[in-house]
Image: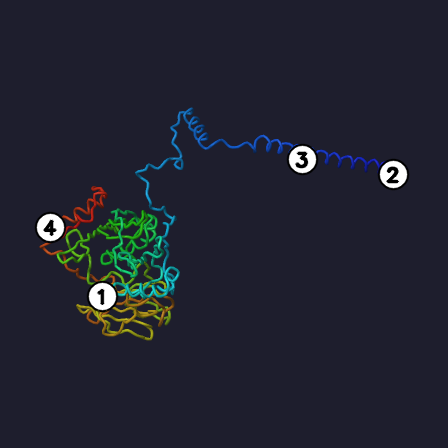
Amino acid sequence: MSRKTTRLGRQRSGFNGIVKIFLYVGGIGAFILLSTVIFMEFVADAPPPPADQQMEESAEGAQEEGEEFEEPEEHKLIPPALSSNATTPGEEEPGVHRGVIESGETAGTLLQAWLPAGEVNSLVNACSPVFSLRKLRAGQPYAIIEDEHGFSRFEYEIDDSKKLVVCREASDFVATLEHIEYDILLERVQGTIEGSLFESMANLGETPVLAVRLAEIFAWEINFIRDIQPDDSFSVLVEKRYRNGEFNSYGKLLAASFVNQGSKYEAFAFSDSFGNTDYYNAAGDSVKRAFLKAPLSFTRISSRFSMSRMHPVLHYSRPHPAIDYAAPTGTPVKAIGNGEVTFSGWGKGAGNYISLRHTGGYESMYLHLSAFAKGLRKGARVRQGEVIGFVGSTGYSTGPHLDFRMKKNEQFINPEKVLSPRADSVDEKTIQRFKATRDLYRQYIEGKKSLTEYTLEKENPRP
């Protein structure tokens, strides 16, 4: 009997504990519910003060704290003098339909939504004397403009400098070519080498195009694969072209300097009496030489010139009278100088290779190519810097690279030690004009003259 009483007491005690817990939790829940109701009734439903009242309160608070109050930008009124019909970026003008040509798109498929088939044919025929609409290129911008009567004008950007404009006039179409207008600003780009030239330009917010153009100017003076070092520095004086306030492309590169391992190289653009523009150093000597420093850009040397090297495929020592440039398959390979193609084909261990004959008894060879440039054949003439083939791994090769060789008078020579002659210098008739241009560009690039003083008409004046 006593055991049953004890067990029953324990059960009641446990039950009472559970009841107390439920009562405690329920009380908390009721308090939260009541608080929410009060908040929704007296606080949340209260309308916010008007925006102007909020601004006044913010201004008063700022003034009380001794701070200068500036009206938020979105509440400022635009002065009538600054009002414009121009649309903001991302906002399209009424009646203007812009886009880019899609792959496979034709004038017919593009214009059929605005014109019947017969009028599309008339428009195409009207364009033929100035520009064939069969030459529409994917990715190029276009615009179709409508007025209250429907189709009014078609514009197509042929390239960065000109566009096709087709206007409806009565029942006919008139096509013309127009120059694309840009706002051109002169800018100075300066930096130091951190990693590669590409990376250094990107760190400054510039595109790879500017890095390539700078490397092309000094391609005869500096081997950008082998020579550049961390903390080398560069300065570029370049026109930047803007459309509708946005950067579009680079214009003329007027001057550049590059400090490589303590040696400073300069280049200044100059137009001669015939209108030919080239780059010259401070003394008026051409920066161009008979041969480029390297046949491709922005890669690395994987093996140097040697008369005794363990061959990676044949596994015995043999001469390697070449420089190997490791690069991805498909990298363009350029002719180091003007020359004639003496061989273009298969060469067993050399794989696909090209041989060029140059003046002065020089010959250059390009081995292990994946493909040749279109139209390249024996007997063809090529110009310095022209793409003649593409990096590959054909023949006796363990990976994609260019095996580059040079000969002089039938004897192999080390390409890294070839010192080639310069091209023509500025002639005596224009040397004073060149010096004036050089000094002006130096003032811009050294920050001694404001870039805002630059005007397209006055720089490098013609005689």
User: In the rendered image of this protein, does residue 210 appear above or below residue 28?
Assistant: below
Return the mark for residue 432: 4
Residue holding disc 3? 29
Q: Nearer the viewer, mark 2 or mark 4?
A: 4
Q: In which quarter of the image is residue 384?
A: bottom left
Crowd band around label 3 with a 10 angstrom C-alpha radius: few (<14), some (14–19), many (20+): few
Between discs 4 and 3, the one toward the N terminus: 3
Q: Which of marks 1 and 3 is in front?
A: 3
Between discs 1 and 4, the one toward the N terminus: 1
At label 1, the amino acid type is: Arg
Can residue 226 be seen at all in this image of the molecule? no
Q: Quadrant of the N terminus?
A: top right
Q: Which residue is pictured at 15% across the width and 50% down the height? A: 461
Residue 126, x across and y down, in percent: 28, 64
Secondary element at image label 2: helix
Secondary element at image label 1: loop
Between discs 1 and 3, the one toward the N terminus: 3
At label 3, the amino acid type is: Gly
Residue holding disc 1? 383
User: In the rendered image of this protein, does residue 450 appear above or below residue 302?
Assistant: above
